Amino acid sequence: MNAEFDGRRGRWIGAPVRRREDPRLVTGRGRFLDDIHLPGLLHAGFVRATVAHGRLREIDLTAVREVEGVVAAYSADDLELGDIVALLERPPEEFTPTTMPILARDKVRFVGEPVAIVVAKDPYAVEDGIEAARVHYDVLDAVVTEEAALAPDAPLVHEEAASNVLLDVTSFDTPGVDEAFEDSDCVIELVTTSARQNALPLETRGAIASWDDRDEQLLVQTCTQVPHQVRTVVARSMRVPEQSVRVTVPDMGGGFGQKCVVGREEVAVAAAAKRLGRPVKWIEDRRDALTAGFLAREQRYRTRAAFTAEGRLIALDADIVCDMGAYSCYPFTVGIEPLMAAAEMPSVYRIPAYRVRARAITSTKAPTAPYRGVSRPQYVMVMERIMDLAGRRLGLDPVEIRRRNLITEFPYHGVNNVTYDPGSYLESLELGEKILRDEGWYELREQAAAEGRHIGIGYSCFSERTGYGSEAFAKRKMSVVPGFDLSEIRMDLTGSVVVTSGTMNHGQSHETTFAQLVAERLGIDIAKVKLRQGDTERIPYGWGTFASRSVTIGGSAVATAATRLGEQLCVIAAHLLGTRVENVELDGDGGVIRLDDPAQRMTFEELADVAYLRSHLLPKETPPTLTATAAFDVPGDGTFSNATHAVVVEADPGTGGVRILRYACVEDCGVVINPQVVDGQARGGIAQGIAGALFEEVGYAENGEPSAASFIDYLVPTAAEIPDISVDHLETPCAFTESGAKGAGEGGTIGAPAAVLNAVNDLLWHTGVQLESTPIHPESVLTALTGADRTEKAGTPV
Amino acid sequence: MNAEFDGRRGRWIGAPVRRREDPRLVTGRGRFLDDIHLPGLLHAGFVRATVAHGRLREIDLTAVREVEGVVAAYSADDLELGDIVALLERPPEEFTPTTMPILARDKVRFVGEPVAIVVAKDPYAVEDGIEAARVHYDVLDAVVTEEAALAPDAPLVHEEAASNVLLDVTSFDTPGVDEAFEDSDCVIELVTTSARQNALPLETRGAIASWDDRDEQLLVQTCTQVPHQVRTVVARSMRVPEQSVRVTVPDMGGGFGQKCVVGREEVAVAAAAKRLGRPVKWIEDRRDALTAGFLAREQRYRTRAAFTAEGRLIALDADIVCDMGAYSCYPFTVGIEPLMAAAEMPSVYRIPAYRVRARAITSTKAPTAPYRGVSRPQYVMVMERIMDLAGRRLGLDPVEIRRRNLITEFPYHGVNNVTYDPGSYLESLELGEKILRDEGWYELREQAAAEGRHIGIGYSCFSERTGYGSEAFAKRKMSVVPGFDLSEIRMDLTGSVVVTSGTMNHGQSHETTFAQLVAERLGIDIAKVKLRQGDTERIPYGWGTFASRSVTIGGSAVATAATRLGEQLCVIAAHLLGTRVENVELDGDGGVIRLDDPAQRMTFEELADVAYLRSHLLPKETPPTLTATAAFDVPGDGTFSNATHAVVVEADPGTGGVRILRYACVEDCGVVINPQVVDGQARGGIAQGIAGALFEEVGYAENGEPSAASFIDYLVPTAAEIPDISVDHLETPCAFTESGAKGAGEGGTIGAPAAVLNAVNDLLWHTGVQLESTPIHPESVLTALTGADRTEKAGTPV
């Protein structure tokens, strides 16, 4: 730990303060979207496409409008809304912009696509209305697989594009790639795939819109991670000034990225409410959430990696294809996944030569959104598989081959033109290994093998860029650059403060950790600090919460605002105490003291009394009121959290089912503001990573019909499937965030699939079979363990 | 007009822009407090004292709680709220602080005082509950008149005070007063009284409070002129941090000062909502509004004025008694009326010597609040009566004697230690006279007298300090100094702006005039400007709207914020256009142009796009977002609007009823931002002034029972009684408000009683009777016109 940053710890930073949101959440007093009732509230639902690809011949809503209780039904032609456009600033040979209409127009492009909105007096009438809709399609061939999308005669999902490849970028092609492969002692070739997944927040999406005649403003209450972006899209789509739309966010039951893009349903609900002059509520049901909500993760990597005999990785050549589904979303676009993968795939390793081609393809499946970790769970899985495979080939154990390749000197400027700030890449690996060794898992593995049990050990090492600043996003050539965030802090007459952030908590405990930052900076009890978020009127702009940016960017803005407020308090106190500002300081207990006479003290209440109620006593040039604002943007390439996950798994020889015996996470997100919160983030992320490694998968039939429309088919792990997870913290403070913290929201999800897959392949190694896709199906494990004979049996009903 | 200020006029300033609030208000789409419905809303009302003065022996709410539909009933002991304290920073010999409990405790001090709050599922059950309450009093003697209050053995309204005189200040006693009287050629002695009045906003008071578990905040929706003050009192009284209370204000149907103080009912409703965890609505009914709402105006002046033979006023000696009723209010106090009267009584005249004693007495009548004009209608009436009477005595016509005494050189520092900024005192008088002469009213008066008709002409001249700044209030030794106000302006991605103000429109058309200020400063269409007000969360603090401070202080803050935003736009544009900031300017059409090449232009939309979405392109040190804030405080003694009112009245010889034949207002509120709005303010104020002059009066029986509990007894003039009113504008710009405007809200009310009373006394002069009290009763006029004989008749039923 850097001594310089020790000063950032204190009474509040680093303290395991209990989550302040929990008392209301665990006693049922949270206010989630569906808890909100308004007088005259109408309910809405969507007529959705029943075919994956088809030309819309007729949308007949006559019968819908005759259903008792139905108030209105609108198709695209009725609402005349502008489309959602997501762009990149890329040349046309690299990128083809496409648009997403709010309601399908001319064509439908996935099963579940909204075709019409039905508004009724209760949710039952909504469902009856939806049933009554008659939509006629000229059915077109579905585009479900990568192969189908890339076929020369593939049906075009978007006719305005020349093909189904909407992005095709060779981001890096550094000198020496081919030479390195020629000179190498060992080449690993690998095709790795990850299935479509659903981020699956406990709370589905939804929105309540209501028009206010007095303020001439549409209030859109919605569960989103990005309230200002929802405002932008709603305003643009409805062609009204942004000031005519207010977006607020109640308590949220998760988002995980699915809610960091703007849903077309949110816009349709807003437009319907405006049209009807009555409040309209839409709550996505689980079937729609599973099939028509934003999905994620479907990627395929074709990779070659060149190693020296000593195990040094000397070149990497990757071909990445991300299946983005039918549409691009705002504010992100089809570029977000492939471009991140291309830029960051070298991961934690020193690689001298790198070539990558990254493509985004469109298909007739639900559109995707960033999901916790974005492309990192996938490329980390690739890199960690490469390390294990090369180690096997070269006779180096997994820890040793990683040790020989890990970045250990910082800042490190990579072949990918990314600068990594200091981290504990090697230290976390060594601690992870030590934990497993000390606990005897290596011995158990040997012993178990002797007993015919199948136990494997797997590691993953990764770092994760957190808090992308505007420079980092600009490098990616996004059409919008979600870099900064803002905070405003106000102290009231009682010396309590309200701090506002443009980030939006949806489970990350901002109410607690941001308050800790403020309490520390001002020297007041956390009880005197209240966070407000999720309201576009409270702050001029905010980019919201995604990409583990909240504490790094939002938190830094909050801390800076608090510091500025503290400075203001000192200026006023010095004036009133008749001394220079250098002669006073915050006393850490809600007051300002005179340094040369600490008995001379003014409490914040006394200072606030002057600032608000007796402003004539303030120093000249000091504005009345105690308030401060701050913007914060992470410079350069941002800051990298890192971790090692060390996993022990056992496969059931009878079913091929994989059970996790031990899960150790050694993580480094810089200064830990609240260890309980970071532990919770790590454990939750790991659970989602395990879900991706072993269970969750959205499949599609050849005609584009999704296979998982309920929890019968979409396998969500429960507490029985997720093991206890230990979390150890290393702390390499970040030099340029205000708290020294780095992001902690996504790491768990990123490391889990790689570690679990490596562990499974460890126990399969002796079979000669290695699996390179997630989720790992029990039948694949069983096949490998038992050979082809047993595979037949595994396929028969039990 | 000062050439310097011509530049302040433009496309928007001075334009008769139609009131932007009218479309919604006249089509019934306004949202007033009683229009607000919330799920689970409960209703509240108050058990009120039935005696004017009594010790509370028992409050028995048992039967109340048994009424079907009643949810709760609380007395003071149940709610345990802190009292409302209004203070002055005065020595104890000058001022006695007293407190007002939220619900009566120990004693009641006026008929209608709230004793308990009843909460029920509907307003009917509330009324039934109130009926069921049993409150037992030990009745004490009421204190109704000044004489009773000042009697040596008077019952004490507040036992903690030594007498019923709560404030007794000799503000001025300049040298030479007695000598001037000795040396004078003419002394006018006068006792003038004005009756209790009710400001009588069309919308009565009310509040809706609801507790929010998620934000841990009490939302108090209330119709108030001072939202932040309501927050302060609710928070203090409930002993919670201010951040735990949010006050918002919907559309308001008037306030006129009655809503610039905090009502105890607002606090009780808030406390009940918090206690019950359900929303509670209270809407004051008209009976309560008439008897238990804040009242106003009850003052008595005993005045002597010394004149030279030439008609020069050389000394003024006044004894002022203001009957403040039972309690002091927050943020004002019993001092507000007498102290203003004492400080400003010299009015528009040059007076070398001045002595004044000002007292506030307490009585067992409803407490008072500032009412449009505060003490100015009263002291102006006194001064204008003095002028007319001295003129009569000295053979000078009303215009001539005023001409000889009016302040004509500015700035003028008065004997009252007040500095008057430039005005058109003489010019407005001369124009007023010219209007009446040109229209032949003087001839008509002569002619009518010959025909036995009774026509009189009256003038009033006055100025009015508007927009008290913190220095002006500090001079008054208030315990809080409501000087500054704040504004924040935000431009959104569409180049539209939202501007926030701490002032609170309740009929003054801020939505229009403030938007004009912003449109002018930024050079954008007014349609792109939206004002938000009446929300304590939107702005750190705001003192609200009273004392004609909105446009002078709030408007100046708004204009300053807009200017700062314009500067920001120029900085960004210069950077992007690659030139110095001195080489660009706003082009008056939503863009910034390069001065040396005006074809190089950036629109506000383009600049906003960079500021929000591509912040990495901004100049260093320029924060992302387009937002600016400003605080504004009027320096020194503030700015004085002025006017002359010229009135022609006729008395009905049969009834003594007074009809206004002609009402001319020549007013000068500096730069007129919107003539329609100023005209509306003037006319509305004059109507209220006429009401005070001729009609409205709250009387009390000896036992403290109010006489006017409905519109049967409280005579509100209708359109039939209020004449057409002409309004002419002179414009002497204010040098230190941003727009050059002065306040315009109160003037009409101030000038009317004096002008009407002078006109009536003009027609009575030949009878030898002069009336010195308002309202002018028809029977008094009749008595004077017909002598004692007819008086008897007038008293008999018709």
Image: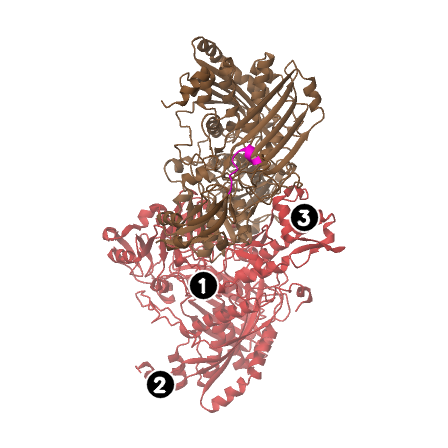
Chain colours: A brown, B red
Q: Which residues are magenta?
A: A140-149
* Pointer 3 residue: B572
Report if residue A145 lies within the magenta region.
yes
- Distance between mark 2 and mark 3 Cα atoms: 80 Å
Residue A25 coordinates in the image, percent (x, y): 40, 37
| Secondary structure category for the residue under label 2 | helix
The chain holding disc 2 is B
Quarter of the rendering occupied by the N terminus of chain A: top right
Magenta segment, principal secondary structure?
Answer: loop
**Which residue is identified by label 1?**
B254
Q: Earlier in the sequence, mark 1 or mark 2?
A: 1
Q: Which residue position holds label 2?
A: B790
N-term-proximal mark, 3 vs 1? 1
Residue type beneath disc 1: Gly
Q: Are the residues tagged 3 and 1 within 8 Å (C-beta)?
A: no
> Which residue reaches farthest front?
A153
